[in-house]
Image (tube, grey):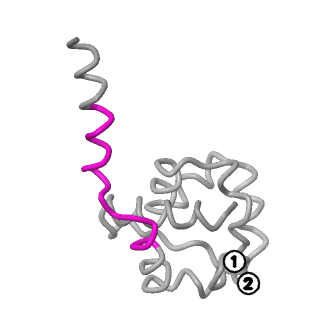
Amino acid sequence: MTAVCALLLSTLSGCFLYPSSPADGASLFRRERCIDCHGPSGLGTGNGPTLDGLASRWTADALADYIADPEAYLANDARLSALADQYDGRMIPFGYLSEGERHALASFVLSIAK
C-alpha cells in the first residue's frame, strides 16, 4: 500500500508543480513575441523555423529547459546548431520566465507542433 501511495503522490505532485495550461502558454506565446519568429500558428517565418514536428522530438520538460537557455542546447546538438545557422538571429533565452510559465509555453508549443 505504501508503494501505491508514493506513486499516487509523485503523479499528483506534477499537477501542482506546473499548474499552467496550454491556454496560458498561448498567451505567453503572444506576449513574449514568439510569433515574430515562429509565426502566429507556429509555421515559421523568415526569422525563425517552423515548430511543426517538435512533438516527435521533445518532451515538455526538455523544451521548457531549452526555452530557458537555447544556447546551452546548441553547443551539444548538431541538428539544432545547423537549424539555428539558417536564420539571422538566435532564439533569445527566456530564463526570466518562471518554471511554470516555461512549462505552459512548452505545452502550448507541443500542442500546436503536431
Q: Label 2, on which residue?
A: 45
Write the residue at 31% across / 24% down: 7
Quadrant housing residue 20: bottom left
SS class, disc 1? loop
Amino acid carrying mark 2 in the image: Thr
Q: Is residue 49 above or below residue 74?
A: below
For the residues labelled 2 and 1, say whether their Cβ atoms are less than 8 Å apart: yes
SS class, disc 2? loop
Write the residue at 63% across / 45% down: 76
Q: Horizontal and vertical percent for residue 28?
A: 42, 78
Write the residue at 55% across / 60% down: 71
Q: Residues within 10 Å of mark 2 (few under 14, many from 20)?
A: some
Q: From the viewer's perspective, is 15 left or right of 40?
A: left
Report the quarter where the C terminus lies.
bottom right
Q: Is residue 21 above or below residue 59?
A: below
Quadrant housing residue 110: bottom right
What secondary structure do most residues of the magenta stretch adopt?
helix
Q: From the viewer's perspective, is 73 left or right of 102?
A: right
**In the image, which residues are magenta?**
10-25
Report the quarter where the N terminus lies.
top left
Magenta stretch containing residue 96, yes or no? no
Question: Looking at this view, is 10 or 31 the one in front?
Answer: 10
CA separation, marks 2 and 1? 5 Å
How many badges with numbers are in the image? 2
Amino acid carrying mark 1 in the image: Gly
Q: Horizontal and vertical percent for residue 14?
A: 32, 44
Q: Label 1, on which residue?
A: 48
